[in-house]
Amino acid sequence: MAQLSDDCFAFGGALLSVEAAAALIAARVPPLGGTETVPLAQARGRVLAADLFAPHPLPPFFNSAVDGYAFRHADLRAGEETRLRLAGRLAAGQQAAAALAPGTACRILTGAPMPPGADTVMMQEDARLEGGALLLPAGLRPGANCRPAGEDVAQGALALPAGRLLDPPAIGLAAALGLPALAVTARPRIGVFSTGDELATPGTPLGPAQTFDSNRFSLLALLAGLPVEPVDLGILPDRAEATRAALREAAGAHDMLLTSGGVSAGEEDHVRAAIEAAGSLVFWRLALKPGRPAAMGVIGGTPVLGLPGNPVAAFVTFLHLARPLALRLCGAAPVPLPRFLAEAAFPYRKKAGRREYVRVTLCPGAPGGLPVAAKYAREGAGLLSSLTQSDAFAELPEESLGVAPGDRLVVLPFAGLF
Ligand code: AMP
Ligand code: MG
C-alpha cells in the first residue's frame, strides 16, 4: 500500500495549474516499494527496480562489422594497391588459432573475432582476389569496419538506470548483457469506479434515461498500457453515503483509486465530499480545459483521483494526473508526454489562465515545413468520436489567447499517449 499521510498536501487556491498538480504528485507521492524478478519475455512495460551495470563489455570482443578481410593496417602501402597473401578464414562463432602473420590477410565474416594482430577489415566488395593473393586499394583508415569490445557498452558502465520503463530496446540491451530476467518494481493495484445513476454497463439493457458507461473501459484500457494492475470496481450510484463507503473500503484494498464523474459542483456530485469525509482533499479543480472539475485526495494513505465524467475530459485528466501518479507509485522515472511542433491551419480563441487541449488531425506539411494541424470540427467534452477521428491534442498554454492560421503549435500525438 502507498503510505501517504492524509494531510501531506497543502490545498492552495481555487484553480490549480496542471504543472502545480504534477509537481505535487512528483514531490509528495512515494513509490510503493516491493520488487519481483521476471523473465525478459514478461518484462515489457515494467519498471527496472535497480541500476543495471554491464557485467560484460558489449560487444564482448573485438570483431568484424562486415564480411571481408582482416589485416594489419601497417601493411597497407600509402597511395597504391597492396597485395597480401590470404591465410585462414574466420566465421562468426570461430576463434583464431594463432595471431595473424604480418603481410597476410584473413578471410573474416561479420561478427567473427578479429585474429590477434589484425586491426582493420576491408569489405569484400572493395577487395579483389587474384589466385591466392588479395589486392587491397589504398585509403582505408586504421580500425575501419571493426567493432572494439565495449564500444556499445563498456564493462561496469550504467546500462539502464533504476526507474527505466522496460521498452523493447531496454529488453534487448538486457539480453545482450546476458541477463535472462530482471528485477522490476511491484505493480500497483489500481481500482476504477464509474459514478452515475444514468450509467448502464455494456451488455446490460439500456433503461430509459440511461447511457452506457464508457469511461470505465477507456480508463481500464489506458491503465493496461502502464505497469499496473487495473481492477474494475463497477458503477457507484449517485448517493453520498454509498460513495463514501465504497471509496473507504476500496482504498483499503488498492494502491490507488480512479473515479470518473460526480466531481463537479452539482447536488448529485458526491465524489469530492466523499473524499473529504473518508480522508482528505489534496486539490479540486484544475486550470484545464477539458478537465476542470478534477479532484485528488488521500483516503487511508491511498491516493484517489476523481476524474471528470465527460469522456474527453476523463482522457485529458488521466494523462495529466492518473498517468504520472501511477508511474510514481511504480517507481518509474518521469516519462514526459510526447510533444512535437506543428503549424495551425485554424483560428481559435481562448481565455488566458488555463491550459487547453484542442483535438486536431495532422497531415504532412510542405517539404521542409512542419506537419499541419487541422481542428476537429466540434468541441464538446462529451464527444468520444472526436477522439477516434483525431490524431493529436494541440496544447495551448495558460498564457495563450488563441491561435491564428500559420501559428506554431505544440501537439501531443495520440499514438504516443494511448
Ligand atoms: P458528471 O460530472 O457526473 O455530471 O458527468 C458529466 C457527463 O459525463 C454526464 O453527461 C455523464 O452522463 C457523463 N458521464 C459520466 N460518467 C460517465 C461514464 N462513465 N461513461 C460515459 N459518460 C459518463
Ligand atoms: Mg454524474
Image: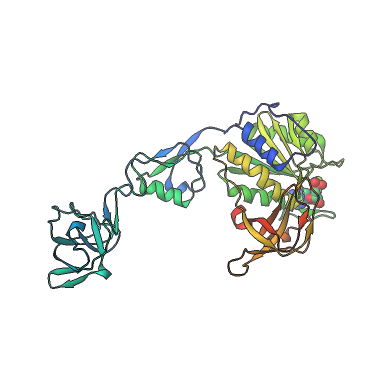
Colour pattern of the rendering: rainbow
Q: Is residue 293 left or right of residue 2?
A: right
Q: Can the viewer see residue 72? A: no
Q: Position of residue 137 (x, y in %)?
A: 23, 68
Residue drawn 18% across and 61% down?
Answer: 106
**Extreme front residue here?**
79
Q: Nearer the viewer, residue 376 or 228?
A: 376
Q: How many marks?
A: 0
Q: Position of residue 303 (x, y in %)?
A: 67, 34
Query: In this rendering, is residue 387 above or below 199?
Result: below
Query: In this rendering, is residue 396 above or below 361?
Result: above
Q: Nearer the viewer, residue 229 or 303?
A: 303
Q: Is residue 24 left or right of residue 197?
A: left
Query: In this rendering, is residue 143 above or below 34?
Result: below
Q: Position of residue 226 (x, y in %)?
A: 57, 46
Q: Nearer the viewer, residue 211 or 188?
A: 188
Q: Is residue 252 left or right of residue 130?
A: right
**Extreme bottom residue here?**
130
Identify the image quadrant of the N terminus.
top right
Q: Position of residue 143 (x, y in %)?
A: 27, 55
- Quadrant of residue 109 within the rendered picture: bottom left
Q: Can the viewer see residue 5? A: yes
